[in-house]
Amino acid sequence: MVPPTEKGTAGKGQLPMEKMKIAATVVIVVIALAMAYYFLVFQSGPASPKLGNPINLPTFATLLSQAQDVYVVMDVSNATGQVKQNVIECGVDFAGSPGLGGKNMTFFSIDTGGRCIGANGNYSSSWCFAQMENGLSIIIQPGNSTSFYTDAMVVGMGDNYTAGGCSVTPVQQ
């Protein structure tokens, strides 16, 4: 027996009410799954890079010499003009540093929209920050000082920069 439909419209091209409810439920579930997938894939991860605890330069140098994976992040999200150019130039100079030779290097740039741009495409910055937790990071951003942490070195970059000024030399052990 077929359940009754509103105003006896069964068989005239309209679905019975129960089938419409099932179809609506399926559509809602598909939308919910798509949203969950989006947030898990594109929005998961920390909102800022993990720095760790403050340390001194010699301790950071030792950690860097022992690290296999190094992430160089050029954060131009708050930089303009010459400072933006200097942040990028500094990142390029770190790429050629003799002290980073033989390490697995990954380069990211954080743009003004909060996107993280890597060699293989664009990602959310939180995705990139999550990747950076797998190694030691060198983060270059606008500023005027350099700080050392157990998980990162933060290099402040201003208006003045001399080519080759961002470099790491090998640590003698």
Image: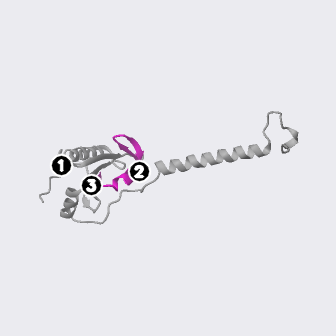
Q: Residue 156 shows which numbered tag?
A: 3
Q: Position of residue 69 (x, y in %)?
A: 27, 52
Q: Which residue is mark 1?
A: 165
Q: Nearer the viewer, residue 90 or 52?
A: 52
Q: Which residue is mark 2?
A: 127
Judged left or right of residue 56, residue 30 is right
Q: Are marks 1 and 2 in contact (CB under 8 Å)?
A: no
User: Which residue is painted at 20% across and 62% down in the image?
Assistant: 57
Say whether residue 38 is magenta. Answer: no
Task: Give the CA distance from mark 3 to mark 2.
Answer: 23 Å
Front of the two marks 1 and 2: 2
Please, what secondary structure does the residue beneath circle 3 have?
Answer: strand
- Vertical relation: 94 (above or below) 59: above
Residue positioned most to the left: 172
Q: Amino acid at mark 3?
A: Gly
User: Which residue is painted at 24% across and 43% down in the image?
Assistant: 92
Choose the circle earlier in sequence order: 1 or 3: 3
Q: Residues within 10 Å of mark 2 (few under 14, many from 20)?
A: many
Q: Nearer the viewer, residue 8 or 128?
A: 8
Judge whether residue 165 can be spotted in this image: yes
* Magenta segment boundaries in residue numbering: 114-141
Q: Are marks 1 and 3 in contact (CB under 8 Å)?
A: no
Judged left or right of residue 119, residue 164 is left
Choose the circle earlier in sequence order: 3 or 2: 2
